[in-house]
Image (cartoon, coloured by chain):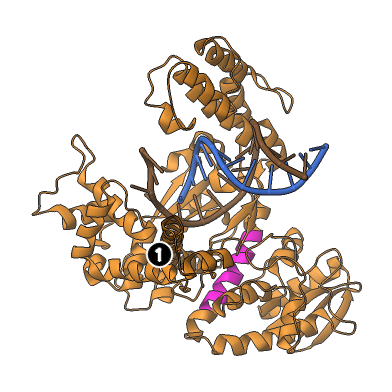
Chain colours: A orange, B blue, C brown
Amino acid sequence: MQVITGREEESGYTIEGPSGTLRGLSRADWADEVRRLEAAESPRWVLPSAEEIYPALVKAGVRLGRCYDLSLAEGLLLAYEGREGESRSLRAAWARANGEEPPDDGPAFGEDAQPTLFSPRGPGLPPGITVVAAARRVLEEQEKRVAATENPARMRLLLAAESASALAAAEISAAGLPWRADRHLQLLEARLGPRVPAGQRPKALVDLAAKISAALGGRPVNPDSSASVVRALAREGIEIPAARKYLLQDIDHPAVAPLLEYKELSRLHSANGWAWLDEWVTDGRFRPHYVVGGVVSGRWATRGGGALQIPRALRSCASADPGWKLIVADGAQLEPRVLTALSGDRRLAEVAAATDLYARLAEALFSGTRYVPLRPGDTRDDRSRAKIAMLSAMYGGTSGEAGPLLALLRQRFPDAVSYVEHAAAAGERGERVRSRLGRTSPAPSAAWRALTGGLTEDEATETRARRASRSWGRFTRNFVVQASAADLTAVLLATLRGRLPDPAHLVFFLHDEVIVHAPAELADEVADIVETAIQEAARLVFGEACPVRFPMDAKSVDNYAEAK
DNA sequence: GCTCGGTGCGCC
DNA sequence: AAATGGCGCACCGAGC
């Protein structure tokens, strides 16, 4: 059964199902009715945009089992059709479905994530067209467009998984990652000194800045300004192109140690200091806003809170409630396994049978050969070299040892390497590439086409064109892997959120990592569920016959820092 | 006073 | 000389 619900511009909420239509509902009545229908029928809910509407339901204590998100589907289909620049709003989709010119009504897929469906002015549908009527029309049209794709079953799976991800994102934000503000405050005070008002340097930074200036001849140096640091070092006879950490590290000068410490503490202060704590942690929970579909490759973005980069130094603050555990699970070497499954490389699948893929890869690459490092004195072990080889294949690296290592990888695993090299070649020609389930890379910009497409007269332009072409090739090379990994994790989330035993719940998700908060007695069960869910997701995405293992390393811990 | 590109960091 | 993908955020400083 299917039920469509949305918010009309002026009259409140509408629910339209097989038993009729309810209009003009208040938010509370709407939530109650949705709850009743969910319990009675567990329908597939068709939502114009889960991001816009679902948080209100979650807040009212309502959970939906399944949904279909028209906005996310529109974005994925537009990208598939090579029209990613067009708006995915309900109004635009409705216009296109009726063969009309879609209005230019705001940000398109992948751009500024302003609400597009329920902007303050409403969805902007023509008079007499209700949200549910428009939604029904768009749904019909999208079903036709799905049927027209190369592999409709995969696209259907993608749309279902992406929709479920949107539900998961709202639920995760609402639940929040348990965060010990008291521990965070202690940590800040210990490293930075007593709290200072916004805009002021804490004592530790003031002291370090003074030390740095003294070590650089006494003239004031602003360590926050890389230009100031570069100039000051130049006066000391030290020439560096920029004040980057890795450049500073190798310099023997008394200013270097305080400079590096300043950088570290300054980052702690500005990125995760008192202001961050005030803004993003409430009632002992860190609640970032996740944006499903916010990255072209299908990864989630976040808006505010910097959830994509919770620094290791603060992870002990992410701490389970008393009597509860955090079950931290990440996909071990997910991307190389995805590449293996994508390319169907049988030899690499044997390597991927190992839990430590890179260790096994090292054996496969180096046993029986004496691989001589290019740079004398390079002490990296074989496992590290195997990893460089694999990352170079997936990212397009060529520097240092990467070239020869990639050549060796290509020799041993030609199917896997040629898979990404075809993707790179397509990108260099300006063509699109697709993930396993049909996520599609955007077209390069007009500027890129102008640069790479024209007949070039001078050598400088030729070089720039070549560089731009190679750069886009690296993007599409990585896209096929990263976006297919996003396919897999979206299906994982969809599977997982339906299976967790109450009251266990997801509290964090990042690329290939999930955290579940659960009563201690459920921790083992949750870990098993996560491991089962990834296997099932892999079967759904890559097929029953896929020989690749996807180990999920699930650890039950009291705080996040213990997980790695 | 503002915007905006560059820089630098840190996460996957 | 650096030349591997994706992201968000804070800060600086040039330019308006």
- Seen from the viewer's position, the closer of residues A222 and A169 is A222
> What chain letter is assigned to the residue under label 1?
A
> Quick check: A68 left or right of A483?
right
Residue drawn at 78 percent across, 74 percent down: A6
User: Is residue A297 among the parts visible in the rendering?
Assistant: no
- Seen from the viewer's position, the closer of residues A443 and A281 is A443
- For the N terminus of chain A, the quadrant is bottom right
Quarter where residue A52 is shown: bottom right
Residue drawn at 38 percent across, 57 percent down: A395
- For the C terminus of chain A, the quadrant is top left
Q: Which residue is mark 1?
A: A477
- Residue that extends furthest to the front in the rendered view of this protein: A457
- Seen from the viewer's position, the closer of residues A478 and A43 is A478
Quarter where residue A238 is shown: top left
Residue type at numbered disc 1: Arg
Name the spot of residue A20 as percent of width and height, x first: 81, 88
> Quick check: A329 left or right of A373?
right
Please provide the residue range marked out in magenta: A157-170
Residue A43 highlighted magenta (yes or no): no
Name the spot of residue A434 as percent of width and height, x first: 46, 74
- SS for dot 1: helix
Give above or below for A515 relative to A205. below
Q: Main secondary structure of the magenta part?
A: helix
